[in-house]
C-alpha cells in the first residue's frame, strides 16, 4: 500500500493512542502527590516544593515540567504556579474540583493493568464490591462521582422537566449531586437517595455541604432487591452499566412498581448506537466494566428500550444533548 496522507494520519493516530497513558498517568500522579495543592494560589520554587512534598528534586522537576507542557501548570524561571483555570479544578474545595476522580484513576489503573487477563477469561480484575470494603476507597470513589457530576448536573437539571413532580427516587444516587441540582431547580421537589450504607456515609456530607438535608432523604437499600414505592420520578444514573441484562430487566420492573401512575424514569449513561461501537468512550467504558464488575457493560438504546417496554413503560425516548464524554439520557413513562 502507498504511503498516502490517509495512511500516515491513521498510523500517527494509532501511535499517539499508544502513548496517551503517559499523559494520563502523569496527571494522576501529580494529583496523588498533591502537587496542585502544595503550589496553591501562589508561586513556588522547585526546591520549596520538593522539600514540602518529600520528593527528589530531579523527579519532581520532570513531573512539573511535564505538567507545564500539558498546560496544567505555569512556569516562570524556576517557579511554578497553578493556572487560572487550574485553580478552579485542581485545588481542594472548589466546586469544579476533579482531584478525587484523578486519584480514583490510580485505582482504576490497577484494574486496567489486568485487561489482557480479563479479556482472556471474561472475568473481572478484582472483586465486584462497588468499592465498599475500605472506607477510604469508598470515599474516593463517591467523591470521584461527585467531581464528574459537578461538570453538568446543573445543566441536566435544566434539561429535565420535573416541575410537576414532588418526589424523586435516585437509585444508586451515590453522592446525590444530581438530586441536589434537581431539587435546586424544582423548589417543590424532594428526593430519596437509595444506596449502600458505606456510600451513604459520604452522601450525608455532600448533601449537608449543599444545605439540602431537609429535602433529600438517604435510604439504605439494595436496588437488586426492593425499592420503596410512591414516587413521581425515578433517576438511574450510571447504574445499568454495572449490571448484566437480566438484572437490568428486573430493575426496570421494580422501578415501574415504585412509580406513581404517569411517573417518569430518567436513565443517564454511556449509551451506545445499535452496533455497540460508538460513541467510542461508551465502547471503551464497557472494558472498564469488564474489569470491575461481574456482568456489567455498556448498552445500546435498543436494549434499554426493550427492557423498559418489557416492564410496561411507554414513550421511550433517547435524548442526546452534547453532555461530557457522550453521556446521554433515556426517558420513559409509567402508564
Ligand atoms: C457509578 S456510581 C453512580 C452514582 C450516581 N448515580 C452518579 O451518577 O453520580 C454507582 C452507585 O451505585 C451504588 N450501588 C451499587 N450497587 C448498589 C446496590 N446493589 N444497591 C444500591 N446502590 C448500589 C454505589 O454505591 C454507587 O453510589
Image (cartoon, rainbow, N blue to C red):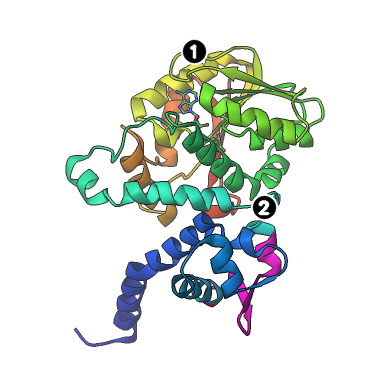
The tag on residue 96 is 2
Q: Is residue 88 above or below residue 169?
A: below
SS for callout 1: loop
Front-lying residue, 128 or 256: 128
Residue drawn at point x = 34 percent, y = 24 percent: 246
Which residue is the extreme one toward the right?
187
* Quarter of the image where the C terminus is located: top right
Q: Nearer the viewer, mark 1 or mark 2?
A: 2
Residue drawn at point x = 65 percent, y = 17 percent: 231
Q: Is residue 247 above or below residue 2?
A: above
The image shows residue 201 at horizontal and vertical percentages of: 59, 26
The image shows residue 298 at horizontal and vertical percentages of: 39, 41
Residue 70 in magenta? yes
Q: Is residue 318 visible?
A: no
Residues packed near mark 2 inside 10 Å, few (<14), some (14 to 19) or many (20 plus): many
SS for callout 2: loop
**Mark positioned earlier in the residue sequence (1 or 2):** 2
Q: Which residues are magenta?
A: 69-87
The tag on residue 226 is 1
- Number of marks in picture: 2
The image shows residue 152 at horizontal and vertical percentages of: 65, 48
Q: Is mark 2 within 8 Å of ligand 1?
A: no
Distance from the alpha carbon under mark 1 to that under mark 2: 34 Å
Q: Quadrant of residue 242?
A: top left
Q: Is residue 1 visible?
A: yes
> Would residue 320 appear left or right of 187 to someone viewing this image?
left
Residue 88 in magenta? no
Front-lying residue, 105 or 270: 105
Determine whether label 1 and label 2 are within 8 Å by CB: no
The image shows residue 318 at horizontal and vertical percentages of: 54, 41
Residues packed near mark 1 inside 10 Å, few (<14), some (14 to 19) or many (20 plus): few
Amino acid at each position: 500500500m502507498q504511503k498516502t496522507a490517509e495512511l500516515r494520519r491513521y498510523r500517527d493516530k494509532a501511535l499517539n493512542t499508544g502513548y496517551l497513558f503517559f499523559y494520563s498517568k502523569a496527571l494522576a500522579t501529580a494529583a496523588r502527590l498533591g502537587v496542585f495543592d502544595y503550589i496553591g494560589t501562589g508561586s513556588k520554587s522547585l526546591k520549596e516544593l520538593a522539600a514540602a512534598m518529600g520528593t527528589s528534586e530531579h523527579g519532581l522537576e520532570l513531573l512539573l515540567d511535564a505538567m507545564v507542557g500539558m498546560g496544567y501548570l505555569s512556569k516562570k524561571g524556576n517557579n511554578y504556579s497553578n493556572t487560572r483555570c487550574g485553580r478552579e479544578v485542581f485545588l481542594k474545595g472548589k466546586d469544579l474540583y476533579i482531584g478525587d476522580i484523578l486519584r480514583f484513576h490510580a485505582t482504576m489503573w490497577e484494574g486496567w493493568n489486568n485487561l489482557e487477563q480479563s479479556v482472556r477469561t471474561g472475568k473481572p480484575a478484582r472483586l465486584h464490591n462497588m468499592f465498599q470494603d475500605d472506607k477510604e476507597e469508598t470515599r474516593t470513589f463517591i467523591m470521584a462521582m461527585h467531581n464528574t457530576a459537578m461538570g453538568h448536573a446543573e445543566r441536566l437539571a435544566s434539561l429535565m422537566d420535573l416541575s410537576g413532580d414532588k418526589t424523586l427516587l435516585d437509585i444508586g444516587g451515590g453522592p446525590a449531586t444530581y438530586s441536589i441540582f434537581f431539587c435546586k431547580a424544582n423548589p417543590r421537589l424532594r428526593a430519596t437517595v437509595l444506596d449502600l450504607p458505606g456510600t451513604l456515609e459520604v452522601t450525608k456530607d455532600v448533601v449537608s455541604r449543599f444545605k439540602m438535608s431537609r429535602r433529600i432523604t438517604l435510604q439504605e437499600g439494595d436496588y437488586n432487591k426492593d425499592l420503596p414505592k410512591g414516587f413521581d420520578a425515578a433517576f438511574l444514573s450510571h447504574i445499568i452499566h454495572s449490571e448484566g441484562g437480566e438484572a437490568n430487566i428486573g430493575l426496570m420492573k421494580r422501578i415501574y412498581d415504585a412509580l406513581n401512575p404517569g411517573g417518569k424514569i430518567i436513565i443517564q449513561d454511556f449509551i451506545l448506537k445499535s452496533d455497540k461501537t460508538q460513541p467510542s468512550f461508551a465502547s471503551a467504558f464497557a472494558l472498564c466494566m469488564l474489569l470491575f464488575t461481574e456482568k456489567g457493560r455498556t448498552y445500546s438504546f435498543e436494549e434499554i428500550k426493550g427492557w423498559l417496554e418489557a416492564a410496561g413503560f411507554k414513550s421511550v425516548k433517547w435524548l442526546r444533548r452534547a453532555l461530557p464524554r457522550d453521556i446521554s439520557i433515556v426517558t420513559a413513562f409509567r402508564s
